[in-house]
Image (cartoon, grey):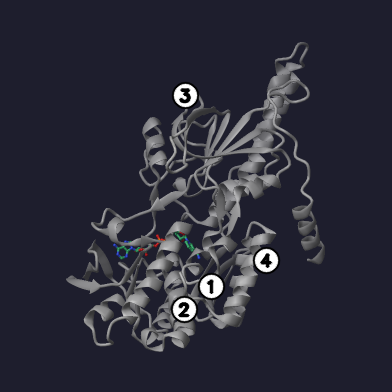
Amino acid sequence: TIGYFSYQLYREIHPKTQLPQSKTFENGSPRKNLVILGTGWGSVSLLQELDTTLYNVIIVSPRNYFLFTPLLPSTPVGTVNVKSIVEPIRSIIRRTKGSVVYYEAWATDIDPQNKQITVKSVFPGEQEDIKTIDYDYLVLSIGATSTTFNIPGVSENAIFMKEISDSEKVRSKIMKTIEKASFLPRDDPERRKLLNFLVVGGGPTGVEFAAELQDFIKQDLKKIMPEISQDIKVSLIEGLPNILNMFDKKLIDYTEKFLINEDVDLKLNTMVKKVNPDSIIAKCKGEEIELPYGVLVWSTGIKPQQLTLDTMKKLDEQTERRGLLIDDKLRLLGAQDSIFGIGDCTFHPGFVPTAQVAHQEGQYLAKTFQKLYEIDQLKWEQEQPNADINSIKTNIDKIESSIVDFKYAHMGSLAYIGGDKAIMDLNIAGAQYRLSGGNFVFWFWRSVYLSMCVSLRNRVLVTADWVRTFVFGRDSSV
Ligand code: NAD
């Protein structure tokens, strides 16, 4: 471990010199353009595994950093700082073997026929700069966006939990609402309304955020604003009979009991139908109920981005509204020769969109691109004078048949449920390990998340944040 960290530290301080991009390789064959859209889990896993000297790699994304999403619910209350779970894309591409070009821009259009994308710069207040980029291979890893299921009032009144900007909005709203409520007498109905904090969606994001919020109230606010901490009510609202539906039933039961014990007001079978500026209307056991709120966080899952929808329309083979259809080699149906899709922008009937899936898909694609490079080199050799066409063809066939299908290896799921407790549902070598509560599970959850961080810097900062929170508590400033 010491050797590994020393090497990582040495590489941070002394980065290797990168090979520059070029139109051709030394033998005169063309170096192909590999364009990657997105800077999330899929793209970064691909970048970290890819031999970037084999292509002219161009990344396009409006977000110039990678966000470690599993710890996002810890950020609004300050258990972990937002900057600790962010890694600038420029730092990531500085560590690759061959130099990589990055454009901070939105891809607005894909033209699969002419193998071209259109991108638009994203600098607020400045005139839009539009350019087209040619690709030989294109990887779509543009993720997805928060869904509202078209429920009226959600976009206007609720805050999502998907991006850094959401986390900052939630933090600001919580702290300001607390201060506003503390201005009012204890028996004022407005104060009671303000101190109703609602989290809609009992998936892992909603549960982890509600857990972090309750930790903040019980561990920190209790010391600095005891009356307010007693009067805040955190409600977790879920439309189905249970929360965390992807987990084993025993773990679900444990979590539900644990949250109730921690004073989280668990409202199951409660489907939100409408959101007003200061209340929600929900259907609960056939009845309509109204719940007033001071803070409303919305985490009911994801839906495709506009570019994903536009790309679907261009390809007849794309018949699924929930995401882009890909084959077993992650090639986009309708554009298998040149476009690949990974992560949350795609739709798999077999598994749910998670960081784990996107990570494995990125790693798989890096290997595929190594083989595609070898095939492209052989195809170029085939076209040279005096080429031994038959033997080259045999070699091409051999490499093509060695590209195996993508197989997702589900390692399991983990979730933090508050009060230094976590649940784990692990799948190791076919055996299932389901554990809840206890120090071991909590520290296991923390060590897995630390190991998943994409840089040494992130690991150091997250560890320092956990120590800071343990020693000094979370701070309540905005
Ligand atoms: P999700 O889709 O997992 O959960 C959303 C929940 O909201 C569902 O239980 C749904 O029934 C509920 N819901 C939807 N509409 C509702 C309404 N109108 N009223 C009340 N409830 C409603 O969403 P998520 O938690 O954002 O997760 C997104 C994806 O990321 C999932 O695939 C998830 O597995 C994954 N993820 C995993 C982890 C982890 O493993 N720790 C953490 C975060 C996200």
Q: Are marks 1 and 2 in contact (CB under 8 Å)?
A: yes
Residue 413: image location, x then y, percent: 53, 66
Write down the residue under mark 4: 460
Q: Is residue 407 visible?
A: no
Give the tally of numbered discs: 4
Q: Amino acid at mark 1?
A: Thr
Write down the residue under mark 1: 79
Mark 1 surroundings: few (<14), some (14-19) or many (≥20) residues within 10 A: many
Give the distance between the C-alpha atoms of the residues marked 2 and 3, in whole angstroms: 53 Å
Front residue of 257 and 420: 420
Q: Is residue 129 above or below residue 360?
A: above
Q: Amino acid at mark 4?
A: Val
Residue that appears at 42% across and 84% down? 262
Give the distance between the C-alpha atoms of the residues marked 3 and 1, in whole angstroms: 48 Å
Write down the residue under mark 2: 216
Q: The C terminus lies in which quarter of the figure?
A: bottom left
Q: Are marks 4 and 3 in contact (CB under 8 Å)?
A: no
Give the distance between the C-alpha atoms of the residues marked 1 and 4, in whole angstroms: 14 Å
Q: Secondary structure at mark 1?
A: loop
Residue that appears at 60% across and 82% down? 471
